[in-house]
Image (cartoon, helix red, strand yellow):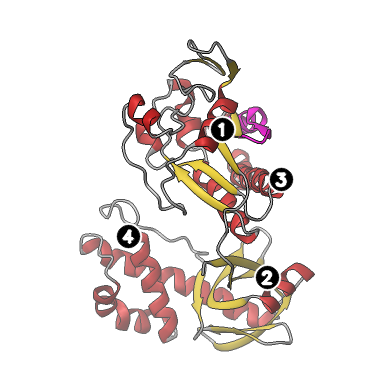
Amino acid sequence: MPKLTKTVRCKLDPGAKERQAMLETIRQFSAACNYISQIAHEHRGMSNKVALHHLTYYGVRAKFGLPAQLACTARDKVAEAYKKGSRRTPRHFGPNTSVRLDARTFSIAKAGQASISTVKGRIKVPMILGDFQRSLLDAWEINGAAELVYDKRAKTFYLHIVVKRETDPPTKSGRTVGIDIGMVNLAVTSNGLRFSGKKAMHLRRHYRNLRANLQAKGTSGSHCLMKRLRGKETRIMREVNHIISRRIVNSLQAGDTIRIETLTHIRERAKQRRARRADFHSWPFAQLQFFLEYKALERGIAVEYINPAYTSQTCSRCETRGHRVQHRFSCPSCNSRNAADFNAAYNIAKASLALGDGPQSIGPKATRCSQLQALQLAVG
């Protein structure tokens, strides 16, 4: 039975004593992560948690005064950071790095208090909960994992609590809807929804040019403005992806199936003009797919991934290779004309060879068009 996982963001309301204890814990945890990272880098980017534990545990306890379990979670955080990307690059952790907690270092009381392990001992901090957070904490199972986060700008502490719930597997008894994801149109569905990317593109270019101008100016005022703008573009795009995924899922019923292209290694495969490379290589394609997947799972909607080869270059009516010119598609065989993104969405919906469920699915290399037609695959 599949499990649905969510993170509940809970605001904390500490007193002066608890606030100082949490600040000191965050500072020492961050310093411990950098200490462990330096040792891991000296050992060729070591990411084995057991080996890293033997090299760093007693040093972390002696130098930074962290409780035993926080020393272990700091080690885990560094090891996982080195597993991602190149191991030759040293990992650096900022002074306000979030503190990873587990079932031994935090718990939640029914009175709405969080018990957190710190360098000053165990403390109890009231949580400010709304109806949404309270309903999730009451109805869902707390996974025993959380992050203590400090928002330096707002001078506020948050506890990000992981909750989980088992859901019934989707039945796949309804219709199948294909979704074409891109930049000109953020998402186009075969059931008629289209989300233009014009405003998002303008927004991203505006902030990129603004950052470049502020960096070139180099004054103290420009640096202050850059700090205020930090993360704003990312937050806006995240909200846009939430809105798009929510509207798509709300247009479907339990038992329906969403079919999407697997975009693994798309940045290495696709070629872009120089003017669009910066946008393309920073575009959050995977984030939108992730939001679609977990929202669909919660509603009993299945998600399948297919090979993206030729989905925008094949006629959705007769499955013949046609011509795509910018945003228009024309078929030389049946003379049909359509918007290229809608044509691709229809092909994705008709695809008879799905690669399986979940974001980990990776499709085979693109085959010849004749082979795909024999399989009745919506190539594109």
Q: Which picture quadrant has residue 129? A: bottom right
The answer to whether 277 appears left or right of 46 in the picture is: right
Mark 1 vs 4: CB contact within 8 A: no
Label drawn at residue 82: 4
Label drawn at residue 345: 1
Residue 302, above or below 329: below
Label located before the other in sequence (4 or 3) = 4
**Mark 3 residue crowding within 10 angstroms, few (<14) / some (14–19) / many (20+):** few
Label 3: which residue? 251
Q: Nearer the viewer, residue 258 or 317?
A: 317
Amino acid type shown at disc 2: Cys
Q: Which picture quadrant has residue 159? A: bottom right
Amino acid type shown at disc 1: Ala
Which residue appears at 60% of the width and 38% of the height?
222
Label located before the other in sequence (2 or 4) = 2
Q: How far apart are the two marked residues, 2 and 4, measured between alpha carbons?
A: 29 Å
Mark whose residue sits in front, 4 or 3: 3
Q: Estimate the x, y position of residue 45 in percent, counting from the top left.
A: 25, 60
Q: How far apart are the two marked residues, 2 and 1, measured between alpha carbons?
A: 39 Å
Q: Is residue 199 magenta?
A: yes
Q: Is residue 272 magenta?
A: no
